[in-house]
Amino acid sequence: MAIQEKKRSEIEDIYKWDLTPIYKNEEEFLKEYEEMKKEIKKIEVYNNHLLDNAETLYKALELDSDISRKMEKLYTYAHLNYDSETNNTRYDVNHQKMENLYQKYCELSSYFVPQLLKADIELINKFKEECPKLERFKMELDDIFRYKDHTLSEVETKLLSKYGNILGQSSEIYNKLTDTDMKFGIIKDSEGNEVEMTESNYSVYLQDRDRKVRKDAFDLMYKTYKNFINTIACTYKNFCELQKVEAEVKNFNSSLEESLFHDSVDVSIYENLINSVNDGLDPLYRYYKVKKEILNLEEFHLYDNYVDLIELEETDYTFEQAKELVIKALSVLGDDYITDLKKAFDEKWIDIYPNVSKRGGAYSGGCYDTNPYVLLNYQGKLDDVSTLAHELGHSMHSYYSKKANSYEEADYKIFVAEVASTVNELLLCKYIINNSKNREEKLNVLNRMLDLFKGTLYRQTMFAEFEKKAHEMCENDEILTSENLCSMYYDLNKKYFGDDVVVDEQIKYEWARIPHFYYNFYVYKYATGISAACYIVNNILSGDKLALENYKKFLSLGGSMKPVDELKVAGVDMNDKEVVNSAIKMFDETLDDFVKVYKKI
């Protein structure tokens, strides 16, 4: 059910998120924005006085926290509006205003960390004894001093902050190009209708039962990216070079090490993921053989990768059906969880359908003083139902973290961000498999579960490997060109798909349409996330009440502990290599189940 994109104004309000709890209207937003332009200057009072005494340090940290909290609220309102309609000039202006305000505050407060690090930790501990209120900022102070060997001088920090907006241009240019300026042209659907293809509806055509439609969509997508490949390669090269320079000046061995340091994650976890998945590719190769056989294809091409193996009599889900299905599937998490989950629907946290110039994809976003909003581009497929469950997993994690923690400790690290969302996806699949009496539906969901592992464990690890190789090339002073980036990506596809799949040449351009490559080593967390989620789901569905209790504790931890230690609360030790291997095993077992059900008469 491909939904023709409408203008934002043509979509009923009941299907849009309600941002009025943040600000009643734009006028109220602009009023607070003007007030913040004055308030941020107050931080200058503490320049060169941070360490005067314990009370002064507390007041400076308190002011910084208060300003940051208000700024996040302003920014959330601006960016949610902008993402809902990127061609709206007013939203674009407000978004840029907040980008600039953040930049200005970074400049004004750039002295903060360097001046703190002039002190020894013993002085800070002495201040804590003299002013017990400083305990409020324990995590922040501990984290600052953890960075002591990687922090620039005050002059260098101020200089770097002045270039902040410029240094972030690679991602912004890429997003503007791909979200707003790039047009993919017209495609004919299976009924012969001419429809404009977009990033939002591309996945629908790639899953079409008509092989010509999905081949045409595949060709059209990468023909367009090919036309822009040199510009995108140049943009990505600049991004990698900036990460390299920043890592060097901050005394990290690599940009990977710097990125993982933020989450207190050792590089070995990243490398173990890639090595473990590389050692576990045989189940993936077997999966493609099974798919080729069932689809009765002489050759299995990459544009055949996303088509469903088994069709349901009714393959489309209204949003109301999706809502009820997700609620039932997640009921195993308890009545209290479901009561809180329903707020997402009742209080309109969710922006449901695509519209012209709406940001593609899906995410959960917000801040301490807002609802954890969800952006969707709902198209009515099972994948969209799963995306709803996934993003609500993020939102509920944020909801419980904010509810249980102060502003200073509410934000959980990115490393654990994909765990709750993937738990929800797995629970949805398991629920349908266990409750459906329809053989074809069960096969379809088993196939969806296989796709989840294929896309989250294997595909994201391939992305992680590409990202690691690209940054290593840059750090070894190799020039990143469109040719070598495309060649490297094509070779990775050959490795991950195996000899029985025709790896079409056009796939070499796919790396150029992955926005997460500008998030600086983010994608591997999807793979570690599904590995951790496998442990958690198995324990919960086994009826282990302690496992459920521990998982809920995990959801409420926010940023109060190191992320690796937070997972230990949920019963998962990411230092154990068997975590990734268990996910590979679950994939293999799911494939066995699929084949058994498929062959059963």
Image (tube, grey):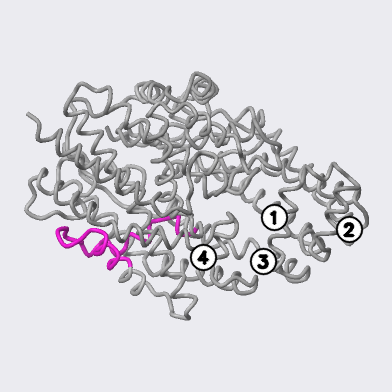
Residue that carries the numbered disc 1 in the rendered image: 143
Give the mark nearest the N terminus, 3 or 4: 3
The residue at the point 46 percent across, 70 percent down is: 471
**Outermost residue to the bottom:** 477
Give the mark nearest the N terminus, 2 or 1: 2
Give the mark nearest the N terminus, 2 or 3: 2
Whether residue 75 is visible, yes or no, is yes
The one of 444 and 378 positioned closer to us in this rendering: 444
- Category of crowding for the residue at label 3, using alpha-carbon neighbours closer than 10 angstroms: few (below 14), some (14–19), many (at least 20): few
Q: Nearer the viewer, mark 3 or mark 4?
A: 4
The one of 553 and 367 positioned closer to us in this rendering: 553
Secondary structure under tag 3 reads loop
The one of 262 and 183 positioned closer to us in this rendering: 262
Estimate the spatial distance between the alpha carbons at disc 2 and disc 1, rounded to whole Å.
Answer: 17 Å
The residue at the point 14 percent across, 47 percent down is: 290
What's the amino acid at mark 1?
Asp
Q: Do the residues labelled 2 and 3 touch (CB within 8 Å)?
A: no
- Category of crowding for the residue at label 4, using alpha-carbon neighbours closer than 10 angstroms: few (below 14), some (14–19), many (at least 20): many
What x and y, as percent, mark residue 238? 51, 70
